[in-house]
Image (cartoon, rainbow, N blue to C red):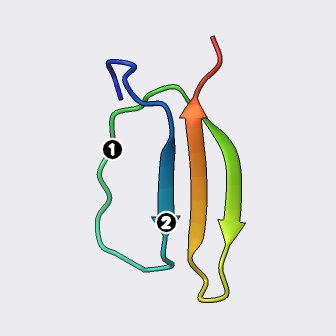
Amino acid sequence: MSNGLLDDLYLQIAPVIAGTSRTANRSPMHLAATRAFANRVIEAHYTPQPR
């Protein structure tokens, strides 16, 4: 991601409570769309931030 080689990123997020968190590398990404499923999973579609 930090090299600009990513065109799209789809994440499916399940509602889970976890322990400690970690800080991730931050890349300029734009949330393009979201979709929620009946089983409470959320899909987040990210694209590179427009320059």
Amino acid residing under circle 1:
Thr
Identify the residue shown where x is 59% and y is 49%. 45
**34 lies above or below 26:** below
Residue 7 in picture, x, y percent from top left: 48, 31
- Find residue 39 and report its image quarter: bottom right
Q: Is residue 37 above or below residue 35?
A: below
Total count of labels: 2
Q: Nearer the viewer, residue 47 or 16?
A: 47
Question: Which residue is depicted at the point 44% across and 28% down?
Answer: 27
Seen at 43% across and 80% down, the residue is 16
Q: Quadrant of the N terminus?
A: top left
Q: Amino acid under label 2?
A: Gln
Q: CA distance from mark 2 to mark 1?
A: 19 Å
| Residue 43 placement: quadrant | bottom right
The residue wearing badge 2 is 12
Residue at mark 1: 23
Q: Label 1: how many residues lie within 10 Å, few (<14), some (14-19) or many (20+)?
A: few
